[in-house]
């Protein structure tokens, strides 16, 4: 013990010597917290703290940062020391406090991960390195850098959530000293704080830190608004000097009279909270009615509900302002009863009723689970095991693998961070928490990804509703599914609100497109092998994958379908002695309908049986094609097949690209007729009602008009270009014949783009 005290004195002497030059530079500034102050802070909530570990970390960090200074002129060491001090208010374990002291050493000093592991252990080394990795990234755009930093932060947190607690404390102290940072950087840091760190603190239930981060960012980003709100708050405080004390004492007395012991304290709301409410509701400061909030801390849940009855019988209740987060907690573990009443001076007063434990979680959130509990496990295990907020974090991290780029991940994560919540139920009573403005699509994906992908309809409270219907608190939602739908429409992505739903829709859409190209590629490959009379087998192709630089058979087929690989390349990889034919069997033949010589076809031509969703097929953009037309397909790399009628003049553009031509033929199921696109050119007499007559002919013959363009070339005639949908060539011909029979129609021709 004497040896320990002697070592501590020696380290304090070393600290004094190292601190003297820095202290001389900041003679007028407050003194830094000393070693014994830090140890006393930790010992106040953890009597078994490792004092030697804390002392060694204090001296190591101070010596490592040496003469480094911050923008304020303070010794750099003052920053990690203040970060550690913030974390002591959260009552965190020794390893977290030590990691806070060391969190900048690897990045900004000569210290290494190996050295920290050797001196302080691998647990602390991993925490410090997790924080260091967040800083080592340079990307082109600010948005991309912010997004990638968020990715790295969340990934580091997934291993140990204490990384987030240190990072939030680090950001809080940086925001407290933001005035010393150059204006351009100041703006960026404040925006990032408001965009990422304050919402993250809220999601972790750390409302005290969140509110201070928001106010500090607000003061930087909109100083004029901040000043105005503060002036109004101060003026209001002068007018209602005794209001808070009066309500506290009156409420405490009323509860005591009813046998309820409570701790009541009030405060006015924070500037940023007031400003956002003014903006959201488009009202002035004077129109805000609930500037004051009061907390009523009670001994147990039963007392909370008894106190609620006393409150509601003492003062008039404001309708629609009651929320019970005790029976239905928020995802960040927040539990409390909220109600708003008309107080003694006719002022609206918001009350929050909760237990001591609930209050602790409401203030420090996820950190409350790391408080020392005898025999309950390590702080890290408690954080992971007991916190719903950590469960949300794990779900968010799952989105990392779904987002195709950093900005996309940032967008979806912000949606998750910023939205308030609604609570809905499945028909079996399972509670589903969603962001506000979420709809049935989001609900379906919250239940399970497979439910979302196969959703075809929904019911809200027993009534059929569109999938895009916004959900309200307490709704019972039933999702109707169909096994026939394996992938959702891509348009759903714009309707979904949650990042999980959007990511799942995008993943399913990508998979469906990949399957389409793979199906097309397989037909092209198998057709080539059949025509040149060589054997095709998946097992043989599997052995040739390295030569094709592809990881799977499906990837090979999709590459062929997209035009990235040729079928001949696949054949050569499987059979090295394969010799490619250079001219197709259709070269030099004439088309009977046009008397044109068809270009040479690619050797890997294939008939496509059916124009359906299993293949990536679209129709010619200017005129389309209908069953009954002789058709050809043109393969566009990355897009699939475009179907043209053989008489289309657009095919001239592909005469020198025989490798892109592909045989196709119609495969129409007459039991389930479908419509196909066609285009008509109509010249009609310019007289009243002529357009109505043309539209009537098309409607009477079960045609569907998609679009009409009109132009006037002379006073007597109007030219119409009509895009319509018909069942087949016979159907189209009948419509043309009936149009020609009309007196108001001078000319009708089919357009082939």
Image (cartoon, rainbow, N blue to C red):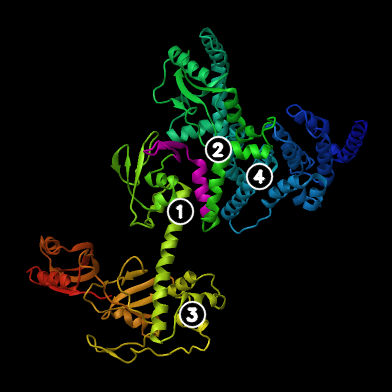
Disc ID at residue 504:
1
Circle nearer the viewer, 4 or 3: 3
Q: CA distance from mark 2 to mark 1?
A: 22 Å
Q: CA distance from mark 4 to mark 3?
A: 47 Å
> Which residue is tagged 4?
160
Q: Whole-percent x and y of residue 430?
A: 42, 37
Secondary structure type for disc 1: helix
488 sits left or right of 212 in the view: left
> Which residue is tagged 2?
388
Q: CA distance from mark 1 to mark 3?
A: 32 Å
C-beta proximity under 8 Å, tags 1 and 4: no
Q: CA distance from mark 1 to mark 4?
A: 26 Å
In primary-sequence order, the first of circles 3 and 2 is 2
Secondary structure type for disc 2: helix
* Label 2: how many Cα within 10 Å (few below 14, some 14–19, many 20+): many
In primary-sequence order, the first of circles 1 and 3 is 1
Q: Nearer the viewer, residue 182 or 618?
A: 618
Residue 112 shows up from this direction: no
* Label 4: how many Cα within 10 Å (few below 14, some 14–19, many 20+): some
185 sits left or right of 487 in the view: right
Q: Is residue 709 above or below residue 133?
A: below
Q: CA distance from mark 2 to mark 4?
A: 15 Å
> Which residue is tagged 3?
570
Secondary structure type for disc 4: loop
Q: Which residues are the magenta region?
A: 408-435
Secondary structure type for disc 3: helix
* Label 3: how many Cα within 10 Å (few below 14, some 14–19, many 20+): many
């Amino acid at each position: 013990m004497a040896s320990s005290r002697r070592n501590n004195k020696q380290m304090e002497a070393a600290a004094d010597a190292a601190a003297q030059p820095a202290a001389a530079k900041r003679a007028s500034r407050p003194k830094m917290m000393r070693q014994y102050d830090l140890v006393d802070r930790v010992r106040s909530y953890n009597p078994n703290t490792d004092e030697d570990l804390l002392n060694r970390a204090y001296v190591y960090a101070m010596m490592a940062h040496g003469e480094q200074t911050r923008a304020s002129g303070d010794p750099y060491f003052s920053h990690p020391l203040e970060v550690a001090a913030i974390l002591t208010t959260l009552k965190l374990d020794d390893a977290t406090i030590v990691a806070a002291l060391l969190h900048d050493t690897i990045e900004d000093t000569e210290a290494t991960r190996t050295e920290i592991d050797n001196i302080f252990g691998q647990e602390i080394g991993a925490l410090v390195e997790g924080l260091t990795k967040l800083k080592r990234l340079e990307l082109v755009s600010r948005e991309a850098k912010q997004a990638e930093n968020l990715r790295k932060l969340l990934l580091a947190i997934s291993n140990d959530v204490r990384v987030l607690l240190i990072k939030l404390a680090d950001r809080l102290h940086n925001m407290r000293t933001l005035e010393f940072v150059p204006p351009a950087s100041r703006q960026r840091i404040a925006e990032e704080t408001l965009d990422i760190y304050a919402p993250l603190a809220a999601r972790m239930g750390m409302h005290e830190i969140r509110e201070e981060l928001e106010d500090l960012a607000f003061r930087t980003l909109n100083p004029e608004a901040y000043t105005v709100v503060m002036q109004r708050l101060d003026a209001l405080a002068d007018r209602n000097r005794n209001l808070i004390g009066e309500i506290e004492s009156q409420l405490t007395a009323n509860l005591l009279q009813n046998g309820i012991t409570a701790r009541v304290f009030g405060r006015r709301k924070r500037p940023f909270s007031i400003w956002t409410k003014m903006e959201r509701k488009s009202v002035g400061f004077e129109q805000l009615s609930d500037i004051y909030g009061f907390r009523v801390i009670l001994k147990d849940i039963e007392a909370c509900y008894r106190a609620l009855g006393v409150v509601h019988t003492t003062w008039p209740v404001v309708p629609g302002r009651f929320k019970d987060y005790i029976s239905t907690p928020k995802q960040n573990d927040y539990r409390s009863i909220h109600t708003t009443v008309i107080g003694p001076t006719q002022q609206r007063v918001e009350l929050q009723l909760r237990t001591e434990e609930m209050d602790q979680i409401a203030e420090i959130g996820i950190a409350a689970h790391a408080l020392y509990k005898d025999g309950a496990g390590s702080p890290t295990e408690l954080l992971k095991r007991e916190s719903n907020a950590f469960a949300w974090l794990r779900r968010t991290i799952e989105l990392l693998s779904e987002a195709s780029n950093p900005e996309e991940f940032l967008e979806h994560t912000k949606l998750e961070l910023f939205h308030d919540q609604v609570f809905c139920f499945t028909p079996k009573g399972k509670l589903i928490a969603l962001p506000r403005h979420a709809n049935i699509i989001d609900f379906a994906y919250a239940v399970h990804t497979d439910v979302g992908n196969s959703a075809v309809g929904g019911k809200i409270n027993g009534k059929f509703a569109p999938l895009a219907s916004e959900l309200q608190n307490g709704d019972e939602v039933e999702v109707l599914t169909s096994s026939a739908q394996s992938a959702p429409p891509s348009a759903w992505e714009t309707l979904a609100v949650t990042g999980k739903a959007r990511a799942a829709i995008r993943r399913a859409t990508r998979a469906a497109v990949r399957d389409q190209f793979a199906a097309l590629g397989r037909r092209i490959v198998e057709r080539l092998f059949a025509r040149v009379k060589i054997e095709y087998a998946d097992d043989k192709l599997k052995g040739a994958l390295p030569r094709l630089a592809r990881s799977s058979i499906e990837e090979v087929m999709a590459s062929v379908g997209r035009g990235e690989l040729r079928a001949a390349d696949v054949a050569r990889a499987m059979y090295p002695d394969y010799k490619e034919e250079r001219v197709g069997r259709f070269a030099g033949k004439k088309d009977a309908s046009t008397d044109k010589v068809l270009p040479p076809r690619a050797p890997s031509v294939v008939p496509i049986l059916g124009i359906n969703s299993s293949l990536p097929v679209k129709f010619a953009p200017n005129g389309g094609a209908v069953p009954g037309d002789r058709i050809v397909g043109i393969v566009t790399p990355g897009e699939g097949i475009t179907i043209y009628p053989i008489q289309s003049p657009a095919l001239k553009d592909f005469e020198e690209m025989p490798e892109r031509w592909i045989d196709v033929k119609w495969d129409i199921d007459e039991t389930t007729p479908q419509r196909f696109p066609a285009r008509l050119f109509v010249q009609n007499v310019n007289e009243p009602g002529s357009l109505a007559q043309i539209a009537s002919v098309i409607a009477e013959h079960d045609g569907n008009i998609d679009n009409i363009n009109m132009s006037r070339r002379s006073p007597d005639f109007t030219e119409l270009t009509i895009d319509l949908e018909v069942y087949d060539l016979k159907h189209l011909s009948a419509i043309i014949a009936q149009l020609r029979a009309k007196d108001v129609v001078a000319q009708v021709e089919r357009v082939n783009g």
